[in-house]
Image: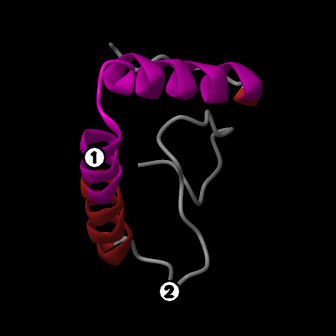
Amino acid sequence: MKPQKTDDVLKEIRRIRKKHYEETKNMTMAEKMEYYHKKSESLKEEISKMNFKDGKYQFPFIKYPKTETNEQ
């Protein structure tokens, strides 16, 4: 499933929930627990790589207005 750029947060949440449902609908409870454990570990790893020192982090699924501080 290709990520979609959208400003509608509710649509993004529904898209993510649908993706998770499709990935786990045929799994047993033990498989789901292992799946979510792996997702949790990958999230912890991703968070550890983020730089929050300047108090700013831009999420890839949100369109930000162009300003001098966030243009790259």
* 66 or 64: nearer the viewer: 64
**Residue at x-position 34% and y-position 70%:** 44
Residue 7 is drawn in which quadrant?
top right
* 13 or 29: nearer the viewer: 29
Q: Where is mark 2, residue-wise?
A: 53
Is residue 56 inside the magenta stretch?
Answer: no
Q: Is residue 35 above or below residue 55?
A: above
Q: Which residues are magenta?
A: 10-37
Q: Is residue 53 above or below residue 8?
A: below
The quadrant of the image that shows the N terminus is: top left
Rounded to the nearest angstrom, the CA distance separating label 2 from label 1 is: 38 Å
Please tell me which of labels 2 and 1 falls first in the chain: 1
Q: Secondary structure at mark 2?
A: loop
Q: Secondary structure at mark 1?
A: helix
Residue 56 is drawn in which quadrant?
bottom right
**Residue at x-position 61% and y-position 79%:** 55
**Majority secondary structure in the magenta region:** helix
Q: Which x, y percent locates residue 9?
A: 72, 30
Q: Which x, y percent locates residue 23?
A: 33, 23
* 69 or 11: nearer the viewer: 11
State left or right for residue 34 relative to residue 62. Answer: left
State left or right for residue 16 relative to residue 34. Answer: right
